[in-house]
Image: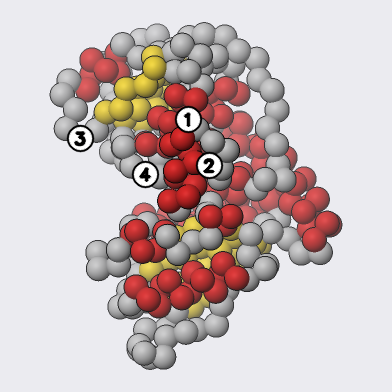
Amino acid sequence: MIGSPLQRWRDCGAGQRPRHSGRATTAPGGTMRAMAPELPHERDRERELNALPSPSRSPDRDAVPGRRQGARLLAGAPIAAEMRGRVRDGVASFSERHGFPPTLAVVIIGADAPSAVYLHQIVRSCRSTGVTGRIVEIGERVTTALVQRRIDELNRDPLVSGIIVQMPLPKRIPLRAVIEAIDPRKDIDGLQPENAGLLTLGYEGFLPATAQAAVEIVKRSGYRLEGLDATVVGRSNVVGKPVSLLLQREDCTVTMCHRRTRDLATHVTRADLVVVAAGSPGLITGAM
């Protein structure tokens, strides 16, 4: 998928795109030994992503662009296929230079169905690009200190190139304590305060993968972002907020909408570009 964190490997660049204006809408998908002596009944497990069974295939919903009442739904799948080839070449180059492939570590705390779906997407991306994947599964009944210790081991592992902590976390595990434990240089989702601060200030840093993918889809579809009125539906730290900041970097005029926004349809209708990152199917309709 275009929003895969695997696209953030710095060895892989993006090409130049032609530009024109228009209205568009895009919806982005948007390792270690067991260390739980204090909770012997909660054993964390580690697996290679490539060892997981392949999930059943389902039709790519955005593979074919469509038009409705003047709006164009931008297709991420063709762009993802092209970029996947670039990533594959970058992985091969990295492996040749360093003697080992880049490794993505995915930390999962407890069990969550949406996380499982996203995990299988990462599995497919790893398989198709040559990236080594590690799943670090930690039981739900663990302490914050144990989670931080596991992340610190991944930080210090020279074979691990990037780390993702899968959301949502169990309610009793504070998100801030977990994301602050991630080395900023391995922070694929761009949630670590150092990276988030650089993004807010407009400086170079590790950009959130899904937010960057949403902007990349628009650019590679031939649109010039400068001066567009953009509406972002959703304000999460993973997609909504960062994509709004990236669009501002491109000189868009950005409106952020959320669950308490009054008259969402008005904001959507008057926008040149709509990015939906709310995780609520059917929220945006053709009548808007």
Q: In the rendered view, does 12 fall on the left or right side of 173?
A: right
Disc number for residue 207: 2
Give the residue displayed 39% in from the left and 63% down from the top: 178
Taking depth in this image into account, of 218 and 212 the one nearest to the observer is: 212
Q: Tell me if label 1 and label 2 are in contact, CB under 8 Å.
A: yes
Q: Tell me if label 4 and label 2 are in contact, CB under 8 Å.
A: no
Q: In this orientation, does residue 232 appear?
A: yes
Q: Quadrant of the N terminus?
A: top right
Q: In the rendered view, does 144 fall on the left or right side of 103?
A: left
Q: Secondary structure at mark 1?
A: helix
Disc number for residue 259: 3
| Distance from Cα at disc 2 to Cα at disc 3 | 25 Å
Q: What percent of the width, then of the height, locates residue 57?
A: 51, 49
**Where is mark 1, residue-wise?**
246
Q: Marks 4 and 3: which is nearer the front?
A: 4
| Distance from Cα at disc 4 to Cα at disc 3 | 15 Å
Q: Marks 1 and 3: which is nearer the front?
A: 1
Q: Marks 2 and 3: which is nearer the front?
A: 2
Q: Tell me if label 2 and label 3 are in contact, CB under 8 Å.
A: no
Q: Earlier in the sequence, mark 2 or mark 3?
A: 2
Q: Secondary structure at mark 4?
A: loop
**Where is mark 4, residue-wise?**
237
Q: Earlier in the sequence, mark 4 or mark 3?
A: 4
Q: Amino acid at mark 2?
A: Leu
Taking depth in this image into account, of 160 and 284 the one nearest to the observer is: 160
Place residue 97 in its image quadrant. Answer: bottom right
